[in-house]
Amino acid sequence: MADKNHLYLVDGSAYIFRAYHRLPPLTNPEGTPVGAVYGYTTMLWKLADDLDKADGPTHMAVVLDKSSHSFRNDIYSEYKANRPDPPEDLQPQFPLIRDATRAFSLPCIEEPDVEADDMIATYARAAQREGWDVTIVSSDKDLMQLVGEENGANGTGRIDMLDTMKNARIYIEEVEEKFGVPPEKVGDVLALMGDSVDNIPGVYGVGPKTATKLIVEHGDLTGALDAAEDMKKSKLKERLIEQRENAELSRVLVTLKEDCDLPQPLSDFKLDGVPPEPLAEFLEKHGFSSLLRRLDSGSGSPDRPTNLNPAKQSTKGADPETDGNRQPLPDWPDVDRSAYECVQTLDRLEEWVTRALAARLVAVDTETSSLDAMEADLVGFSLALVANDACYVPLGHYTGSGGSDDMFAERPKQIAREAAFAAIKPLLESDAVIKVGQNIKYDINVLLRCAGIAMAPVHDTMIVSFDMDAGRAESGIGGGHGMDELAERHLGHTCMKFKDVCGTGKKAIPFGEVPLDKATQYAAEDADVTWRLYQHLYRRLPLEGAAQIYHTVDRPLIPVVARMEREGIKVDRAALSRLSEQFAETTARIEKDIHAEAGEEFTIGSPKQLGEVLFDKMGYKGGRKGKSGQYSTDQAVLEKLSASGATIADKVLEYRQLSKLKSTYTDALQEAINPDTGRVHTSYSLVGAQTGRLSSTDPNLQNIPIRTEIGREIRKAFVPEDGNVLLAADYSQIELRLAAHMADVPELKEAFASGEDIHSRTAKEMYGEVDRDTRAAAKTINFAILYGISRWGLAGRLGIEPDEAQEKIDTYFQRFPGIQNYIHETLESVRAKGYSETLFGRKTWFPRINSKNQQERQGSERAAINAPIQGTSADIIKRAMARMMPALADAGLPDVRMLLQVHDELVFELPKGDVEAASSVIEKVMAEAAQPAVTLDVPLGVEIGTGESWDAAH
DNA sequence: GCTTTCACG
DNA sequence: GACGTACGTGAAAGCT
């Protein structure tokens, strides 16, 4: 052991009383008083920041009073009996002390029937016996009895105290100065003095001066009391004799109980770089914005030594190869797959669980039979505690190709599923142990479905990576945040590939058929690598200014989205089937017509063949396009042809629409119905879109048709269960509202404040008059602005010449100079820093913003103009989602289920009777979602509808 | 595995 | 001199 252990014991209960009286009466955004909590939080922060200092803590715990009753009341019923109740605005702060402690990931000791002082004494002595140093963070005079040195088993242990309010260390000298006696005699002095606050009687008329004098003269309390007989006659002599029993009782009351049972071993208190629980979330909740800023500026956080260099920010364009992603690799041994254990007995598993509980952080990975978390069977799981300290626990492996249910299949030795689940459940559900995973939402859902385990709390390396590096990496599978890529990029390690283990294509085998040795190497490596990535990435989070967005927005969303995926939504299979049939008939008819008109049979679905038929054979005009030299036949081209009288173009358009609806929706959605639940369960990606939006796959439920009449037929097939309704809540014009706020456009802000139609207002400003045409044009221009405009693009949309479009753009900028400034400033900032930022601090990187390739550069510029707006909107609805279920529960609406998110819309299913109450809760949560972190200059409008289908709810 | 098209916000 | 022109997505189909 290089350094001496140093335990800090924080006397939380005493601190809050002092902080309450010394700090101004702050309240948090909800109106709860939090002044004392604020003081407490800053104190913990300061302590944790000393982590790497010479005299700083290696171990820390907070000790709180559990109840007002203790064994002292049994000895003396009057003990603390005249203590008044704490002030009214202090009472609600007690539970918050516990939350604050948890936010710092510190152990919190609260035992019944003893006082905090007794637990502090017990732990201090226990540590001292081990030869540790101990600092008691308190200024309670009773605790001064403990100060001093003692020889323990492993060297000398020293106990001192720290008064954080006076920033003073208290050691033997200071105790002597206060009491005039050494620490071991303090109890005797206190016994004579008594204490009116605690109602300790002492000897009436004896105060600190006399008590000290008596103890100094006579050695200790007994000596002083015995000496009373020989004193010359005085009031003091009488009182000492008369009140001898009171003094002796007091001596017992002030003696600290140093042999309490230890609810947790000392080793649990280790500060081993274990990161804090959602500290940022806590800070934001209570409006501690100055601390939040400190967290993000990286100027000290509890899990991070302050001697790390602050984040190096590139001042020029960002290069994905050199910026940020390359950090010196921590000093871990290389991945050694032979070090992994295959756990095949319950004894061994229990050993792993015990060690994981002590480690307080464990990487977890599940192996299953399917990529779909709602259909997968659990085949095994792996755990990792430290680099190379990882195991795989097989549960459903077998040999032979008869499938996992084949009763003749041979099964290698494995722990019985239920026994294994019972063994890991306390670990995976423990509040005190953080579970880390790569895309852990998947594992949460698999474990809940297959094992009945509700895994929490969690961290996700994929999301940590995304929040720091969105846009930095070339997007591959997982948007550049897949585990294999992260391992290559950050650890220089090449993972075993799934296909090396299970094969690929037709020859692929389920994971359950993989032999245990190979399965162990693969599965345990995943957990090992996840653990290493976590250590690496999580440390960078505050340095990169991404801690706030991770802790307050994305991390809280993981269990929320996991639950939405499990809920799924009901679709009317018969209705979809009827539509499929109808589309099949119609497309067959149109196909014949098209072939007849073309004079040959060809594949209409092939753009290549279609282009040749239209432009070569039939001689319509319409240039080549693209490097492929192929004709373009997209909607715009076909509509032009149609306008010039080509009836075949109309038919192709209709054919295309119907075959799209059939293949992508009416057929595919029927396939997607889960046989167990009878509902459709999408999978949301939290790292799918560079701007911070969610994306939806398998199936994509964020692009269900709505814009056309026939498309809306599909929406009608999304239905509630009997007795329920669907409720859709939409943010109205949220991106334009945010643009008005962010670009500071008074005219637009006024329009939103007064509820005016925003496109009409734009038309009024641009054209001077409002009619159908000018409003439509204004709407196009409004959106064009959000997306980063070009004269050609706008010209194409408005059907005017580029010169004229440029005039419109100029007029717009003239009328709304804020918009032009916003675009200019955003681009300048992105060019300088390499990233854009949302109002909530989400960063998106644009490595090509300074590219010499014009096309690349301009593309990045348009995306960079849009990202802060689209991203802020995404942040807001995510915040609303994270708060939604607790808000509904608080309102007594536990049966309301949140099913879908479509960027600016949330879809719920609820009992008919709950509609009115739920609507007002949902509206409020969504409308107030930006607060308290951001106060917008515009209101957030929310439109709510309900009905017997998703279509009807709009 | 890439390209084209089109569904959504 | 040609390119390609609005931001963000995912799925299906055809083709290489």
Image (cartoon, coloured by chain):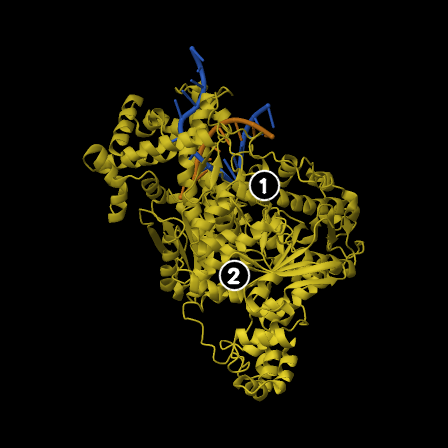
Chain colours: A yellow, B orange, C blue
| Residue type (three-letter) at the residue carrying disc 1 | Leu
Percent x, y of residue A931? 39, 52
Which mark, residue A148?
Answer: none
Separation of disc 1 and disc 2 at Cα?
28 Å
Residue at image mark 2: A99
Percent x, y of residue A875? 44, 46
Say left or right for A494 vs A890.
Answer: right
The image shows a total of numbered marks equal to 2
Are dots 1 and 2 on a single chain? yes
Percent x, y of residue A73? 57, 81
Q: Is residue A255 visible?
A: no
Q: Nearer the viewer, residue A791 or A9?
A: A9
A758 up-or-down from A885: above or below: above
Q: Nearer the viewer, residue C5 or A582?
A: C5
A15 up-or-down from A251: above or below: above
Q: Nearer the viewer, residue A567 or A869?
A: A869
| Residue type (three-letter) at the residue carrying disc 2 | Asp
Residue at image mark 1: A308
What crowding class fits label 1: few (fewer than 14 Cα within 10 Å), some (14-19), or many (20 or more)? Answer: few
